[in-house]
Every structure is written in structure tokens, then in C-alpha cells.
Amino acid sequence: MNLIDENGLRIDGRKLDELRPVKIQVGVLRNADGSAYIEWGKNKIFAAVHGPKECHPKHIAMADRAVLKCRYHMAPFSVPDRKPPQPSRREIELSKVIREALTPALILEEYPRTAIEIYVEVLTSDGGSRAASITAAAAALADAGITMRDMVVAVAAGKAQDKLILDLCDEEDKEGQVDLPVAYMPNMDQVTLLQMDGFLTREEFEKAFNMAKEACKEVYKVQREAVISKYFGDSTPKIKEA
Amino acid sequence: MSKVERKYVVPGDVIAEGDYVPVSNAYSIGEKVYAMRVGLCELDGNKVKVIPLSGPYVPKPDDVVIGVVTDVSAFAWTVDINSFFPAFLPASSVYGRRFSAEKDDLRNKFDVGDTIIALVAAFDRSKDPMLSVSGPRLGLAPAGYVVKIEPVKVPRLIGRRGSMSKMIEEASGCKIIIGQNGYIIISGPQEGAALAMEAINMVEDMAHMSGLTEKIERFLADRLGLTAEQPAEQAQAPVSEKAAADAAAEPQEDRRRDKDSLEEKRE
């Protein structure tokens, strides 16, 4: 499969260091304490936050902080072939990864003995759904009014046909050589998630990592704007109860 | 009063740099002060705080809250106060020291599903909040509608020295009892209650705007102008001062009694 053409453009026509279009909307679900919807390339993902609330089962509660629970789930219709609805190995792993990418940004000590639940529901999946999920979940957490040190945004970088690329789409993720998702707290300048699948030289890694970090700052602008416009945007119509 | 500067913030925003003290919903690392919640940031002298626009109700001792009884045991009621902990109302708060678990049936006082007005007696996050209903105007709530708003927006609904809630009360002819936890009881004639609900929802939607009182005032005036006869005339009728005073003096047994509103007491 030819992922990059002779003009240096990728299969969806992007340049090597170009992001897919990102759209975020905050406060979209009425029955959740906080929520966000993200469209990132072909990804369509909802994130909802419940809590802080009473922690069940009681024995997992912690005396000095809240327990963060996360469920990443893909709808049966989110992929070309039907995906069985029960959590797969991959979904369980991504739930853990997303939870751990968000934990450093939260001040869980504010809510001892409680639980905060994050539900990520992927409606249509494309490459980089974990990055999109983290970005949406952080916006949903801010919407829920959970105390946070910073927002979290995530973008993946990678490599295909020996060239470093940014924000991998599904085909590049599957056929490419490297996938390097990075979650980042833009104001703290701290990384909360760094995974790598494939091989990079040290120089390539530095370059790809910085590319992802810079892209996170771009996505952060969209994310911040989405939160601001829910609370202060008088022009954007509020999503009212149906 | 020094000049207060306000701006919109989201978590992680740098709100101030230099010699500032974070007061609430803000924290500092080195010279920088960061916001922890979505809200309005206020710089007052060297103090920095963020007024949050979303978030759960965190019980605070001496808050008046409105709750719904969810469980009755032999010694206590469990009350939902719209927080992350269920509240606990010990029987001794109602029966005093003569309480006897064998003789007294707690269901005679409050049963599951009853709405009560209570005071947060103690809370320190290591235990569930404890309530008390011993005090004037506390106990079983009067008949009316329960409306829920975001707890962080309750101060806006009360307004400066209770101005906002008083204005809505006068326009709607309903009594409005505001719990700090975001539960509100509106009791009074139905048309008035509908108007009050609409006004309260408006306050919730526009809590971050300035000049809110004027906006609500105009809205209420418009409404009363349109439906000239009904609510406007009723506005004074049902809440006579005498009735209110009677209500306050009555003991807690009477389930259907009307109550005076509480918000003047706590500004």
C-alpha cells in the first residue's frame, strides 16, 4: 500500500505534519455531569463523566482520594465489521491507558472516598481514537467541574514509508511502521502518556515526539475554545434538553 | 473596595504571575497561579480566586440544604442532598436525648421520599455529612415544586442580600426556599410557580453574565405585562406576612404548613 505519494502527500491528501480537522463540543449529554463530543478525522466519540459520586463497591474506595474509573467502549457499528459489544482485550487496555493519561491532571484528593467515572463511547472509529478519547474526556472532566491541574490533549505521531508523519489515520496506523501517541498537559508542559509501537532511531523519536507535542498545543486551542464556548459563548446555541 | 478584574478561565490557565495568593479553585507553582476549574477568575489585590461555573455540591457546615429521605433505619435517616455523599440525620436531632430506638418509629416523622429542609451540622470529608433539623424553619418542606439547579450557581439565584430570589418571589407570588445544594422548593399558585421556574432556569443559564438582575427584572416585567391580570394580582395575596409569621411559629408536626423563605438568613 502506498501511503505517501510522489508529491509527499498522504492518502487523505494531508502533508506529513498536518493534523486532521478536529471539532469538539462540550456539554452535549444532559444526564451526565460533564460531557464532550469530538470529531477528529473520521473518529466520532462521546465522552461522559459521572461524579464524583459514592464509590461502589465500597472496598475499592480510597480514604484520601477519589477512584478514577474509565470505560472505553466501541459501538458495534463503529468498525466495518460488527464488533461484539462486550469489552475486548484492546478496549480494556485502552480504558486503562486513558485513565492513566488523565490521572496526573486531576486533583483527586479533593474528593476522598468517592469515584469519578469516565465513559468513552466510540461511534465511528478511525486512527488515533485513544488520542481523541483522551482529548474529549479531559474536556468532559472540566465540564463536570472536577478540579484539575491542567487540561490534557493527545496526538499521535508515527512513521510510514520511512517518513515521520503526524496524526495517523486508520490506514497509516495499520500499514505504517510506527505509532507514537503522546498525551500532554500544555500549561504544565508535562507528558502523561507516551506509547510506541514500532522502531525509531533516537533522532527520529525526538523529532516525532516534538511534532506530536507541538500538535497537542494546536489541538489544545480547539479544546479550550470548546469549553469556553459552552460556558461563555453567547453566540453558540446551547444544547437544550430534547 | 479595590477594583476587581474578571476573566473566563478553564483548568490549567495561567491567571496571574508574580506575588499572588491563590484563594480558591486556583493553585500556584513558583510564581505562576493556575486555575483549577472552569469559571470566572477574580484578581482582587494579590488574591486570586476562580468562581466555578460547574461542579458538585461540597457540603459545608451551617449550609441550609434541601434533601430527600432515601432510607430510614432504627437510629437515623439517610438523606440525598445532591452531593457525593449521602447525608445522615440522626434520630436524636429530632427526638432529642429521650430518643429510644424501641419506642420511637422514625417513619412517623420523616418517611422515604419526604423532602426536608436541614442544616449541615458537621462535615469534614472523612465521614458522611451529618444534618440537623433543630432550628427555625427546618424540618419537613412545604408542599411545592422541587427544582434542581447547579449548586455552584446558587449564590447568583440568591443575589446580593437575597435581592434576586426576593424579586422572583414578589413577581411570582410564590415562596422560594433555596438549598445551598441546588435544590429549590417553589410553593404557591401554579401560574406563579411556572413563572418562577422559568426565571430560575434563566438565572442558571446566564449565571456568568453581568447585569443579571436587570435581565431577570425585565423578563419578569414582560411576563407580568403580558398576562396582566392573573399572576400580578396574585403576587401579593397568598404570602401575607401574618401567614408567614404563623408558619414560622408552628411546631414541626404540621406537614402542610407554609414556610418563610430562608435566604435572608444567609447571604
Image (cartoon, rainbow, N blue to C red):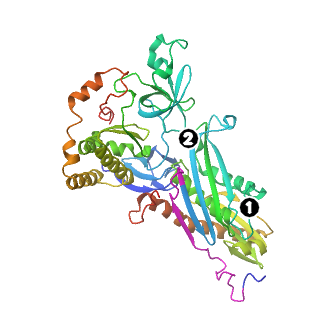
Please, which residue is most extreme toward the right here?
A199
Q: Is residue A235 above or below residue A12?
A: above
Residue at coordinates 64% horizontally, 76% vertically from top-left? Answer: A17
Q: Give the quarter of the image for residue A214.
A: bottom right
Residue A110: give its label: 2
Q: Position of residue B158 (x, y in %)?
A: 33, 42
Residue A25 is one of the magenta-drawn residues? yes
Q: Residue at x 29, y 31 (%)?
A: B260
Query: Residue B96, relative to residue A230: is it above or below?
Result: above
Q: Amino acid at mark 1?
A: Gln
Q: Quadrant of residue B210?
A: bottom left
Report the number of numbered marks.
Answer: 2
Drawn side of residue B187 relative to residue A200, left or right: left
Question: Taken as a whole, is the magenta stretch helix, strand or loop?
Answer: loop
Whole-angstrom CA distance, mark 2 to mark 1, is: 29 Å
Q: Residues within 10 Å of mark 2 (few under 14, many from 20)?
A: some
Question: Mark number for residue A195?
Answer: 1
Q: Is residue B141 magenta?
A: no
* Residue extent of the magenta highlight: A5-34
Q: Quadrant of the C terminus of chain B?
A: top left
